[in-house]
Image (cartoon, rainbow, N blue to C red):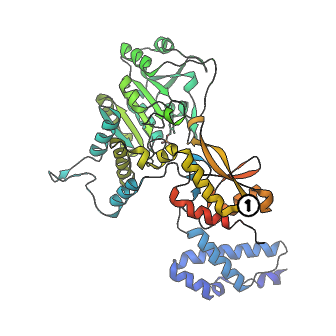
Amino acid sequence: MTSRFREIPSVNQVLRQRKVSDLISEYSHDSIVELVRDELAAARQSVASGGEPPSLDSISSSVTKRADSRWKSWPETVINATGVILHTNLGRAPLSDESIEAASVAAVGYSDLEFDLESGKRGSRQAHISQLVCQATGAEAALVVNNNASAVMLGLAATAAGKEVIVSRGEAVEIGGGFRIPDVLRQSGATLVEVGTTNRTYARDFEAAISENTGAILSVHASNFRVMGFTHAPTTAELVEVGDRNDVPVLHDLGSGCLLDTRPYGLAWEPRPQESVRAGVALGFFSGDKLLGGPQAGIIVGKREYVDVVSAHPLARAVRIDKMSMASLSATMLHYIRDEPTEKVPIWRMISAPLDELRARASAWNGSAGLWAEVVESRAAIGGGSLPGETIESFALRLDCGALGRSAESILTHLRQRDQPVIGRIEDNHVLLDTRTVLPAQDRAVLSALQSLIPDL
Ligand SMILES: *Cc1c(COP(=O)(O)O)cnc(C)c1O
């Protein structure tokens, strides 16, 4: 047994192998030594459990593979054929060409991020973006931070730390990723006061809970679930009425930041930031990368006196947005100001894509899959914790597992492991590739992925 261990090569022997010494010229010496050590440890383990000692050559090849998989460039582009438009695991909203270009300008060189070119003095990184956000939403003032979770936390900390915040029992919810409203409130230094019941809460419930300790009323859009049937929630305007009467600010976590009317696309109504602003909320919060269709960001809109208090809070610096996201968000906001989101913003192009166009693309995909697939009607979803249960009609290609001679799972795996991974979904034991979420520029890559599935006859 001990002699078998002695057959395992030493670190230095492996390092002298051509394949491994080539790696050292590409990476650092120390990082390759670490890989070799990991590989030799694996070899010792395999010998300990009765395996053969691997040859010097096979160890070198494994070291190369480890280097390739550990240090490949990341993230990889994947083709989203799941039909879920805002897929959080796949990076939520893809950006418009203009938003990508703006991020790249901010990254490539120096910029006037916090510099006033007219006076030559220090400028504000918020000045430009807040003006665009105000124009698109009708708000008096705006502030942008790194995501909506921190926007809400910051808004609560700045307006209600040490005080009570009144929340409807039906809205003391978990948004996802451990973001739970009661916990966020506690973290921000406020105390939660729940009112109403899980399914029905009225404006008078809020009014009855107001005391001299009240810091704010918080309304949270139930963005990832739906309560149906015997339900009631006060409108934002009713809450603002209660707030105004008692001199209590109303904070509204809108979640998605949808600036367009969703109803013409066959979707349910989604609250819009401009409606909250019009209703008179002190502060409204929403994401940059949900239905707004831009980069990760948290956008705070509202009354100047409250936005000023939020901007001056020490946490605002801790949750500052980076220059690339800021640039990219500016370009996204401009699409709305130019009234071109359905032409330019990728997720809105997907949501508004006409059905006959999708059917034609699915047929073109089918051309290469031939007898092994069928064009079918499907339902695409918004996802990303927006419009729960709401789907849009779409067309998909359904792959015939029987004819392809493999299981749906194995087809999904094959498609996922290609150089240009294609992510599909399984429905009724068949793989479905939905056209609505595939960017038209990726159609060719889908075609070649489909061809790679066709069995050799
Ligand atoms: C998504 C969401 C958040 C968190 O937003 P992020 O931008 O992902 O941080 C907060 N509140 C609501 C209601 C949401 O839907």
Residue 313 versus residue 53 in the image, above or below: above
Residue sitting at 58 percent across and 53 percent down? 360
Q: Which residue: 48% across, 26% down?
A: 219
Q: Residue at x 42, y 53 (%)?
A: 96
In the image: residue 384, left or right of residue 346 = right
- The percent position of residue 148, horizontal first and vertical second, equals 46, 40
The residue that label 1 is drawn on is 371
Between 455 and 366, the one lying in front of the other is: 366
Observer-nearest residue: 151 or 235?
A: 235
Q: Residue at x 38, y 25 (%)?
A: 281
Residue 453 in the image: x percent, y percent?
A: 71, 65
Q: With respect to residue 417, does 197 lie above or below?
A: above
Regarding residue 416, the answer to whether it shows in the image is no
Quarter of the picture holding the N terminus: bottom right
The image quadrant where one finds the C terminus is bottom right
Residue 216: image x %, image y %? 42, 23
Question: Farthest residue toward the left?
Answer: 119
For the residue pair 383 and 303, the one nearer the viewer reads as 383
Residue 258 in view of the camera: yes
Q: Is mark 1 within 8 Å of ligand 1?
A: no
The number of numbered badges drawn on the structure is: 1
> Image quarter for residue 157?
top left
Residue 11's place in the image compared with 376, above or below, is: below
Disc 1 is placed on an element classified as: helix
Q: How many other residues sit within 10 Å of disc 1, few (<14), some (14-19) or many (≥20)?
A: few
Q: Quadrant of residue 300?
A: top left
Residue 121 percent location from the top left of the image: 17, 51
Q: Is residue 305 left or right of residue 296?
A: left
Name the amino acid, label 1: Leu
Q: Quadrant of residue 54?
A: bottom right
